[in-house]
Image: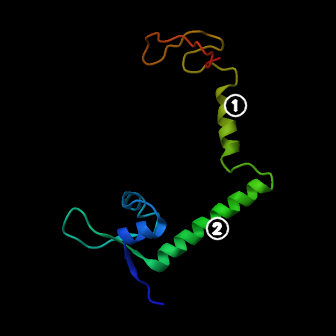
């Protein structure tokens, strides 16, 4: 099978996304720019490279879904929980003591009260 060159329009149609999305993600999709003297060089994709990138993404997605099925959390969840615990460790955050009804907010000006007690 010959390795065809695909245009942004063809890739967008194949993936059922907008051409703008393809332009935004052309490097992630394995695309490259043709040599050009102008500001906007045309982007192209080798069909085999694109298929390989998509297969790899599908495989990673399936591995992640399988890990969720086996009771594991998503890979970044533990890091996120750790960050939350550090922030809430009874320490003063952003110039606000736990239970305080005011915040120093931006700069040194006093701003809105914490009417929903979110900063406690």
The residue beneath circle 1 is 85
Q: Quadrant of residue 17?
A: bottom left
Residue at image point 68% right, 63% down: 62
> Considering only order in the chain, which callout, 2 or 1, is on the residue closer to the N terminus?
2
Label 1 Cα crowd, 10 Å radius (few <14 / some 14-19 / many 20+):
few
Give the left or right position of residue 76, taking residue 42 as reference.
Answer: right
Res 106 → quadrant: top left
| Disc 2 element | helix
Instruction: Name, please, the residue furthest toward the right.
Output: 70
Residue identifier under label 2: 59
> Residue at (75%, 57%) from the top-left corner?
67
Apparent side of residue 54 relative to residue 14 in the rendered image (left or right): right
How far across and down, in percent of the image, does residue 91 sit?
A: 66, 20
Q: Secondary structure at mark 1?
A: helix
Disc 1/disc 2 C-alpha distance (Å): 33 Å
* Rendered residue at 23%/71% (across/down): 36
Label number found at residue 75: none
Q: Position of residue 107 (x, y in %)?
A: 42, 17
In this view, the residue in front, 53 or 89, is 53
* Residue 78 sits above or below residue 118 on the image: below
Q: Is residue 71 left or right of residue 93?
A: right
The residue at the far bottom in this view is: 1
Instruction: Give the percent coordinates (x, y) of residue 18.
Output: 40, 59
The foreground one among 39 and 116 is: 116
Asked if 106 appears above or below 29 in the picture, the reply is above
105 and 56: which one is in front?
56
């Amino acid at each position: 099978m010959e390795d065809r060159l695909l245009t942004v329009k063809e890739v967008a149609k194949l993936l059922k996304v907008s051409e703008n999305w393809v332009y935004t993600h052309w490097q992630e999709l394995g695309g490259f720019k043709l040599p050009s003297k102008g500001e906007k060089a045309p982007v192209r994709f080798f069909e085999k490279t694109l298929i390989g990138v998509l297969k790899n993404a599908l495989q990673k997605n399936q591995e992640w879904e399988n890990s969720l099925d086996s009771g594991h959390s998503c890979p970044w969840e533990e890091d996120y929980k750790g960050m939350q615990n550090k922030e809430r460790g009874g320490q003063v955050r952003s110039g606000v003591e736990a239970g305080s009804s005011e915040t120093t907010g931006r700069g040194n000006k006093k701003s809105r009260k914490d009417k929903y007690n979110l900063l406690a």
